[in-house]
Image (cartoon, rainbow, N blue to C red):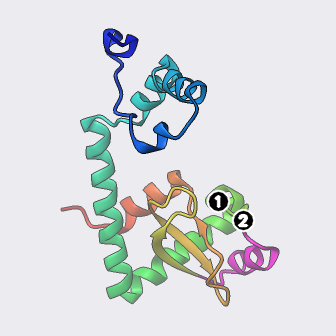
Amino acid sequence: MHPEREMGYHSRMSDPFLDHLPSQEREKIRKRLRSPEAYEALRDKVKGPEDLERELRRSEQLAELQFSLETEPHMRGALREQMREDIQEKGIDAILEADALSPEGKGAIEQGKFDVRVDAHPQSHEDAIIAVPEGNVQEKAPVKTVFSDRYVGQFVKRV
């Protein structure tokens, strides 16, 4: 009997990819896949029902905000104005994840020359409120989570 089967770690890794590797390499991969660290990392990726519910609620609120921004021009202006005030009061780095912005992009946002939209976050690819400097739509600066939650709570109508 195979040791993997005895220990309950039998994986379905007997695919063509592993069949072409030397036996030492196959064994290294199998060991790594059944290591406690691998299981811990996998367990961290699995989300519980509370996490999923919270994520779903946040996604719904961001979708509602996006719809409002697209259909109600005064909402877009009000959110942009609120963000502009917060940026002037607290600084751009406190409100936005602006590390990837060019100096011109930062300057435009600090002067209030930016558009607001709900779009995919550059790193996590999850929906987020994004500030886009006018004139350069390639650059975007996501709003930090604390302020994003505040803006969503402020601008999304509760049902």
Residue positioned 60% across, 78% down in the render: 132
Q: Position of residue 49 (x, y in %)?
A: 24, 37
Number of disc labels = 2
Residue at 66% over, 66% down? 87
Of the residues shown, which amino acid type is indicated by label 2?
Ala
Q: Is residue 91 visible?
A: no
Q: Residue at x 58, y 73 (%)?
A: 131
Q: Is residue 140 above or below residue 37?
A: below
SS assignment at label 1: loop
Name the disc covering residue 100, or none: 2
Q: Quadrant of residue 112?
A: bottom right
Residue type, mark 1 in image:
Glu
Residue 37 shown in magenta: no
Nearer the observer: mark 2 or 1; the answer is: 2
Q: Which mark is residue 97?
A: 1
Label 2 with label 1: CB-CB less than 8 Å? yes
